[in-house]
Amino acid sequence: MEHEALFYKKLGEKKVHCQLCPHYCVISPDNYGNCRARKNIDGKLYSMVYASPVSVAVDPIEKKPIFHMLPGTDAYSIGTTGCNLHCEYCQNAAISQAFPEDMPGISMQPKEVVENAIREKCPSIAYTYTEPTIFFEYVYDTAILAKKKKLKNIMVTNGFINPEPAKQLYKHIDAAHVDLKGFTEEFYRNICMARLQPVLETLKLLDKMNVWIEIINLIIPGLNDDMKNIKEMCEWIKDNLGTDYPLHFSRFYPCYKMMDRPATPYETLKNAHDVAKKAGLKYVYVGNVPEEEYNHTYCPKCKEILIKRTSFFAAEKNQLKSGKCPKCKTKIEGVWN
Ligand code: SF4
């Protein structure tokens, strides 16, 4: 559905200049921006995916994955077509790289999203599956209504957004699951068609705005699995965001344009986990693997298992008492109620 976009300027010859993300697309009439979700129609910029999700589901919050917020609850999850990144290993390429004409969504206005979340007994709404930044207006309108009904809002995002829109949106967002795809500009440029620095700036901004952050890093053999680089990433997190936010390492499986690479060896993920712990990060997880050892939340002081997870789909047992370890009373960072 067409909805006039926020954050753009009109140029001569009916061109428009989108200011939403660091691509800063200049778009001629009848053309889309790089994200394939925003289109110039007769000199005005429109979101073409407003209130038209192509994916809607009730998911365990752990599936986002968000581990330190309302464990064991469901998140009402929505996503439209389009993305401002073009990662060669995208697991959702069928929708993230589609134009709205290729895959028209169902009609679901912000008010209906909130009503559905309440009806499905979901205490949160997750904007996910593709990149919610590019369906900004839909997220923004829904998030404001959701807040009024005391629901939490979660962005599952690549963090590639400009600071002004981010400041406007994240006032209404409780948690962000940010995909830090690698820790070199080269990886972002060659594999994702984007840049690293704006993502780092977003992470710093969200921390300043008191948005609960969980970071995911998907490790691809031969591309971003260098332990020296992973150590630099962990140290950057510690120095700029502190040691309280969870870091999730995730296993790569061959996908989309990267069918020729093997899945990430478990050993590599374990090594990355150890590097992150050694750097001082308190909560480090390993996802997308059948092994459960690194899916549990441990007390960083006494090492007690506080939240036991059978897989990333479920929090099986939660021992936290008022956000603290029941044994040694250490405060565990997160949003627990
Ligand atoms: S949001 Fe889309 S149209 Fe706007 S600058 Fe980013 S990629 Fe381009």
Image (cartoon, rainbow, N blue to C red):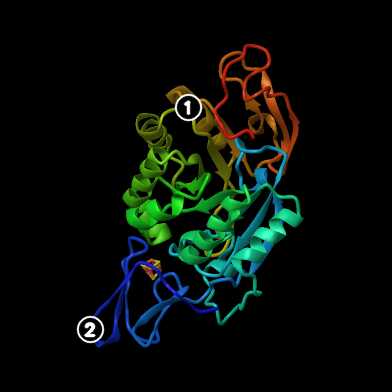
Q: Is residue 16 left or right of residue 225?
A: left
Q: Position of residue 28 (x, y in %)?
A: 32, 83
The image quadrant where one finds the N terminus is bottom right
Q: Is residue 4 left or right of residue 66?
A: left
196 to 278, vertically: above or below: below
Q: Is residue 272 left or right of residue 184?
A: right
- Location of residue 240 by image quarter: top left
Q: Residue at x 51, y 49 (%)?
A: 173
- Location of residue 291 by image quarter: top right
Front-most of 247 and 321?
Answer: 321
Q: Residue at x 48, y 27 (%)?
A: 281
Q: Residue at x 60, y 65 (%)?
A: 110
Q: Position of residue 80 (x, y in %)?
A: 57, 68
SS type, badge 2: helix
Badge 2: residue crowd in 10 Å (few <14, some 14–19, many ≥20): few
**Residue at which label 2 appears:** 12
Q: Amino acid at mark 1?
A: Leu
88 to 241, vertically: above or below: below
Q: CA distance from mark 1 to mark 2?
A: 50 Å
Front-most of 310 and 331?
Answer: 331
Q: Position of residue 25 (x, y in %)?
A: 32, 71
The image quadrant where one finds the C terminus is top right
**Residue at which label 1 appears:** 281
257 to 222, vertically: above or below: below
* Of pointers 1 and 2, the one earlier in the residue sequence: 2
Q: Position of residue 128 (x, y in %)?
A: 57, 57
